[in-house]
Image (spheres, grey):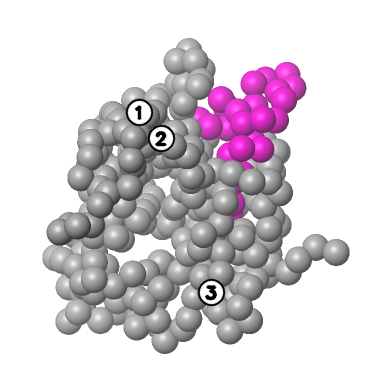
Amino acid sequence: ESLPFGPVDSQGFLLPHDNFLGACETAEAADAALERLREEDLLVIHLFREEAPFWHRPGSVLVVGSSQHVELFDLFALRAEEGTELVNWPLLAQKLRGILSQQDVLKIVWGGIEELIDMAIELGLGIARSLKPNEKDPVGPVLDSQSLLQELFPGSGWPSIFRRVLGLRLCLEEEGSNWSRRPLRRSQLHHAAVMTWTQLPVLHALCAKTSLLPEAKLRGHVCVQSRTRFWLRSRDGGKHVLGQLAPPGRMVEPKGA
């Protein structure tokens, strides 16, 4: 008997969608999911990654949500699916990459343009350049929900922000999930969907309070578009590029230690 699609903690927030069909594991299912998102003009996107001894952690589950739908794409399963008449994964990766470049769709991403570019590069890894048409299309526009909410609620994590704004509690039982292990639990998929989709009602509530979030402040966290390129990003005080091995002793000692 399959586990219910919901939080482990019965008091945790339950996603208000009754049309969840499970994570997409085939190109056919993914195409259907993309069709359901086709008419949306606002999407929230998050990539859940596996833990690995690299600065670059391979993407495992891509979540794309709108006001009416939450679609999960199991990237491991989609990459592993054998092609039929056409090569499934390169074509599907290009369709997913296309979402990131739609200029008439605002993307909400925790981490903003840098994270969006990481997603675009992730979707193209291991695919021959000849199979990646339009890969140089700029990505965006994107709202950096992380920088915006950290400005409004300094020092607060996402569960705390969610509770302060909406008065509801998130279940964190699946917070330390192993995203590389298969099969994924339905409670694990619900956690991924909730942690992504709940950014929408929080931002809607904040935008309704213009005294707290005036339009000028909101626009300050929007990037209209950016070319896809490898970022030299700073994490935990160290520089890295995608695919680079982490140095020995990846954990950073606390300041003053």
Q: Which residues are magenta?
A: 71-94
**Residue 68 placement (x, y as % from top left):** 55, 65
Q: Could you tell me which quadrant the C terminus lies in?
A: bottom left
Q: Is residue 85 magenta?
A: yes
Q: Nearer the viewer, residue 50 or 13?
A: 50
Visible in this render: residue 228?
no
Q: Which residue is mark 1?
A: 244
Residue reaching furthest bottom? 167
Quarter of image, res 249: top left
Q: Is residue 175 left or right of residue 203?
A: right
Q: Could you tell me which quadrant the N terminus lies in?
A: bottom right
Q: Which residue is mark 2?
A: 54
Residue reaching furthest front? 257
Residue type indicated by callout 2:
Phe
Q: Are dots 2 and 1 in contact, CB under 8 Å?
A: yes
Q: Nearer the viewer, residue 131 or 152?
A: 152
Marks 2 and 1, how far apart in space? 6 Å
Above or below, 245 relative to 41:
above
Above or below, 79 relative to 222:
above
Q: Residue at x 61, y 78 (%)?
A: 9
**Residue 16 placement (x, y as % from top left):** 59, 74
Q: Are dots 3 and 2 in contact, CB under 8 Å?
A: no
Residue type indicated by callout 3:
Cys
